[in-house]
Image (cartoon, rainbow, N blue to C red):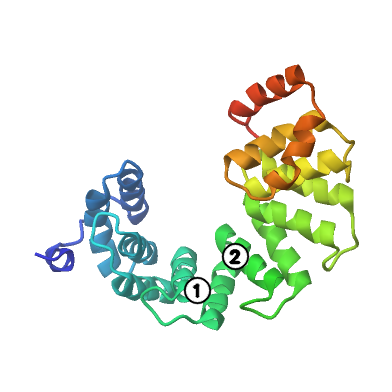
Amino acid sequence: MRWLDALAKKKPRGDDATVAERLAEAYDASRSGEHARALDIWGPLARAGVGRAQSNIGACFAEGLGVARDPKLAAQWLSLAAETGDPIGRRNLATLYFKGDGVEQDFARAAELYRAAAERGDGPAQDMLSWMLLEGEVAEPDYGEARRWAEAAAGQGVAASMTRLGMLYHNALGVARDPAMAAFWWRRGAERGDADGQAMLGAAYHLGAGVTRDPAEAYFWLLRARAAGNPLASQFFAAVRSALSPDAAAVTERRAADPLPEPPP
């Protein structure tokens, strides 16, 4: 029996649990890998019109979690969620339109949905909208709006947007060139694990751009970026490594192998 057939036969639970409690129960199940149990909880809620449940079911079909992957069915569920105003549903539907996955590729529709989710406070949507407005490949470039949405996403802890703000200040895109501000934002992104931010901060320490030149710090951040597969790190790696003694390099390598500490707020 298809999962949707089973869903149609399920009845919503009574008032013994609030919608928020049931969503929390499903979220915990999903996080622990019990996607089928999460879907059993989301199903009645989705049929009752709960947008977040519809969004989560759509995400499961998009990623093949607990069900066979079905992008077209994902788009149907996410469209229902988007109609309720659910920002995550809008963002996930935007991703399908951006990729042309289960729907015809439509960058304009993707940008519209990302903006709608961003305006509802969704950090990843704010980050993606910022990227689209900065790159100008699939949307009209607008550096001011790109910065505004990157700042909004950065305020929610999105590391990629922190790194993007550094690039705006580095390249003087809609703002005056400011190497210190660029390094400030790269550090914030780097401390939260963004490989691009780590590579750019390592390069800044190597060149003394916006920060005091420090070969050990440059090597530390380039090591982390290279471990994450960042291609930019390799451009500076040999020069930075050669500036350190074998003992200093070994100390930095041991430090770079440790987990990053919790970043400051």
Q: Earlier in the sequence, mark 1 or mark 2?
A: 1
Tell me the residue at 74%/20% (across/down): 246
Image height of 240 relative to 1, above or below: above
Label 2 crowd bin: few (<14), some (14–19), many (20+), radius 10 Å: many
Q: Which residue is mark 2?
A: 128
Identify residue type, mark 2. Met
Mark number displayed over residue 98 = 1
Mark number displayed over residue 157 = none
Q: State yes or no: discs 1 and 2 in contact (Cβ < 8 Å).
A: yes
Tell me the residue at 64%/50% (across/down): 231
* Rendering coords of residue 94 (x, y %): 49, 72
In the image, taking residue 219 as reference, residue 8 lies left or right, namely left
- Quarter of the figure that contains the C terminus: top right
Tell me the residue at 83%/39% (across/down): 206
Q: Is residue 157 visible in this depiction of the protein?
A: no
Q: Is residue 195 visible in this depiction of the protein?
A: yes
- Quarter of the figure that contains the N terminus: bottom left
* Rendering coords of residue 149 (x, y %): 68, 64
Tell me the residue at 57%/43% (across/down): 228
Viewer-side label of 1, 2: 1
